Image (cartoon, grey):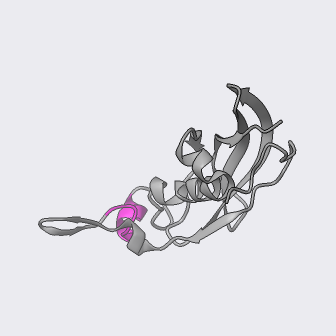
Amino acid sequence: MAIITEDTPIGYTLPAISRKLDVGLNQVKTDDGKIDTIHTDPDAAAREGLNKPIAVGSRIFGVIPRMMMLCFDDGWVVGGKGSVTTRRSAGVDDLVTAKGIVISKVPEGDEKLRVECEVWVETDKGEKVMVGQCSGLVARTK
């Protein structure tokens, strides 16, 4: 059941969704075995000027669709839209949390309302590593 409805007010804070990242999520395998990359190997990361391996972007981003699915259910699956920009990397062992706020509601046809949200992903240090906007559809009954 979707949390967001046509009655959800502008300014409503979306429920936060968190995920603890780990190096196992970043493993890359080939027919020849494991590949050491800046996402899995401290030495490879250091050669690129990083203080530790960084998470693969899709692992960081993954908390946003989970949050949107919780908020919109089928209105995210059918009709959901999103545009997100990576601002900086997150450490391979960081806790990342998707957050968001409802910023507008726009009629879409006679039966649907598009609810637009500002979304972002923060690390446990409060750094915004991804920012953007996502929207989903809700039924109009009024």
Q: Is residue 3 above or below residue 107?
A: below
**Residue 82 image position (x, y, % from top left):** 58, 39
Along the line of sight, the residue nearer the viewer: 3 or 88? 3
Along the line of sight, the residue nearer the viewer: 98 or 23? 98
**Residue 25 image position (x, y, % from top left):** 41, 69
Find the magenta span and give its range: 37-47
| 7 magenta-colored | no
Residue drawn at the location 51% of the way across and 65% of the way down: 51
Residue drawn at the location 58% of the way across and 50% of the way down: 74
User: What is the residue that sits farthest to the left in this orientation?
Assistant: 32
Q: Is residue 108 above or below residue 33?
A: above
Q: Is residue 80 visible?
A: yes
| 38 magenta-colored | yes
**Residue 61 image position (x, y, % from top left):** 54, 54
- Residue 97: quarter of image: bottom right
Residue 84 vs residue 42: left or right?
Answer: right
- Residue 116: quarter of image: top right
Along the line of sight, the residue nearer the viewer: 59 or 69? 69
Q: Is residue 87 visible?
A: no
Residue drawn at the location 73% of the way across and 51% of the way down: 100
**Residue 128 image position (x, y, % from top left):** 68, 53
Q: In the rendered view of the protein, which quadrant contains the C terminus?
A: top right
Q: Is residue 5 above or below residue 22?
A: above
Residue 95 vs residue 93: left or right?
Answer: right
- Residue 69: quarter of image: bottom right
